[in-house]
Image (cartoon, rainbow, N blue to C red):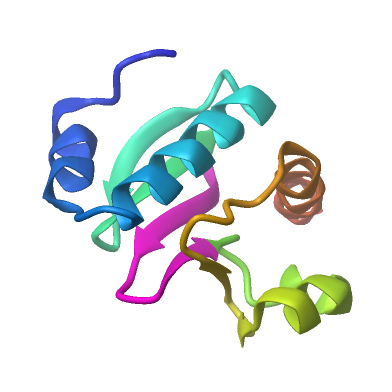
Amino acid sequence: MRTPPPDVAAYYATLASPQRETALTMRERILEVVPMSVEVMKYQMPTFIVDGEPVCGIMAHTKHVGYYPYSGSVLANFPDLMDRYGGTKSALHVPLGEPLSVTTIRKLVRARRQRNAG
């Protein structure tokens, strides 16, 4: 697994357990889906950029890790995920210790990239 840039690594270093483990597992899975992505800090969260556009970000909270698809319209296409995880129109609230699967991340990233292309 590649090393995150210093500012992104610093963010993960500030997290307590189990937020850190959940966020880092999600990072690994995101990088499996979009290995060509560039990691940056955007809106105070690790964000994954592909072809100059953000495809997702993750941010740790007290009781969950938020998955942010950087579009308020992406999650509306996944009511099953919203029912399972809860969240807002622009974020899934992923329970600590239960990171999103690679399959789920792949679906979400694909939906976001289609929006970027459209």
- Check the image and report above or below for 38 versus 54: above
Q: Position of residue 73 (x, y in %)?
A: 73, 75
In the current view of this chain or complex, which residue is farthest to the top?
2
Q: Is residue 55 magenta?
A: yes
Q: Is residue 54 magenta?
A: yes
Which residues, given as a range, are shown in magenta?
53-67
On screen, residue 70 versus residue 60, left or right, reads right
**Residue 2 or residue 39, whichever sits in front:** 2
Q: Position of residue 34 (x, y in %)?
A: 63, 27
Residue in the image at 63% along x and 24% along y: 32
Residue in the image at 44% along x and 13% along y: 1
Q: Is residue 51 visible?
A: no
Q: Quadrant of the C terminus?
A: bottom right
- Check the image and report above or below for 17 versus 12: below
On screen, residue 68 versus residue 105, left or right, reads left
Residue in the image at 85% along x and 79% along y: 79
Residue in the image at 74% along x and 72% along y: 75
**Residue 108 or residue 93, whichever sits in front:** 93
Q: Position of residue 38 (x, y in %)?
A: 43, 28
